[in-house]
Amino acid sequence: MPIALIDCNNFYVSCERVFQPRLEGRPVVVLSNNDGCVVARSQEVRDLGVKMAAPWFQIRELAERHGIIAFSSNYTLYADMSNRVMSLLADFSPQQEIYSIDECFLDLSGFKHLDYTAYGQRIRTMIKQHVGLPVCVGISASKTLAKLANHVAKKRPGYAGVCDFNALDAAALDALLSTIAVGEVWGVGPRISARLIDMGITTVLDLKRAPPKMIRTQFSVVLERTVAELNGEACLTLEEIAPPKQQIMASRSFGEYVYTLEELAQAVVTYTTRAAEKLRRQASLAGAIQVHIRTNPFKPDAPQHQRGLIVPLPTPSDDTRQLVRAALFGLRRLYRPGFAYQKAGVVLSELIPIEQRPRTLFDDTVAQARSQSLMRVMDGVNRIMGEHTLHLLGEGLEKRWKMRRGHKTPNYTTRFDEIAVARAD
């Protein structure tokens, strides 16, 4: 079964470059929440030796010396650009699995009459023309091999952004795999990689030729399946619909320290609202909500307070108001005055599909219908008019605790008042 993996190159950075062409060829980084760490790097920044997750304050001098341009994470923009890419890719195969915000698998089983490399180039051209993002395409007989083919397409210019392992004979493919470090295999993290290297398994080809039973004994059945995938046996099928999450979390560090219960409550209400929106999108109900707050653990000399509490709900719900009431109930029991709080968050758990809502003799069906109607209206308005157009007053107005995003670009594609404007010089 031929499988293609399409991966957007330097996705966050590329999204920023679409609307600011002057950034092409220049060193660019995108920073995490509160402009803390590097979460995306252009190739020019990689060449300077900047590592992923490097704290921004540690590389600021290097940035000034080499003209590195920093942006705050613009998740609204990135999500919208991702949706545009994925909707275009859906036209290239009836079977699609969206793996992450910038990666997608396509089943090409029904396209055996086509030249896969040429088809991959069509995909690249389409995405570049319609969205402006560069992508690479890897094609092979299994997901694991397709990921490796994509790695080759991205790292080796001779492939021009598309690598089809199926076009290589067995000897040529093995020769290529012998040049790739074992740590590049999908699912082989640093710890497993170190153990494999100690056993003399240093390349992808070494792992491909390793005895499966030995791998299962020494590691796990998961890695045994990886070996089978490297040998062209498709053990991982495409998931056309992502399975519902078993937990939904919303959590952020604050832009400045929070001392009062009132400001902590505003943050918790905001995070609960976000989690509830995600809950409804996957048509689930939550049976419990966990609230957690903490001070800065990296300042051991300061007074520390880190606590969490699970609050069960009387009945599973997706109503933001009910979830907020439970979250604030828990927060009031966690809060202690006199501490500088740095972070808060909520976790929705005990999730069930909405059609499995438990029924009792005391159900108020009228109230449930009103709740569903209200949430539907809120979600609809926010989807059309922009997030937080309708929200609970408990989220507050000033929100001084909001995360720092001093280098954030406009939401070019989702807000009319921030739409990109082209000017002739």
Image (cartoon, rainbow, N blue to C red):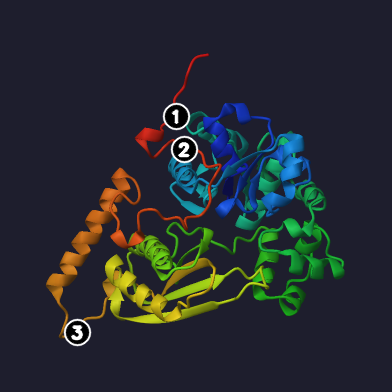
Q: Nearer the viewer, residue 390 or 334?
A: 334
Question: Horizontal placement of 164 versus 282: left or right?
Answer: right
**Do the numbered discs 1 and 2 sit on residues whose CB atoms are within 8 Å?**
yes
Residue furthest to the left in view is 366
Measuring from the top left, give residue 332's x and y in whole percent.
39, 77
Measuring from the top left, give residue 224's x and y in whole percent.
69, 70
Q: Amino acid at mark 3?
A: Thr
Using the image, tell me which numbered label, if any, was put on residue 360: 3
Q: Amino acid at mark 1?
A: Ala
On screen, residue 127 above or below 76: above
On screen, residue 59 above or below 142: above
| Element marked by disc 1 | loop
| Element marked by disc 2 | loop
Dot 1 crowding, Cα within 10 Å, few <14, some 14–19, many 20+: some
On screen, residue 335 above or below 125: below
Q: Amino acid at mark 2?
A: Pro
- For disc 2, the marked residue is 410
Measuring from the top left, give residue 80's x and y in whole percent.
44, 43
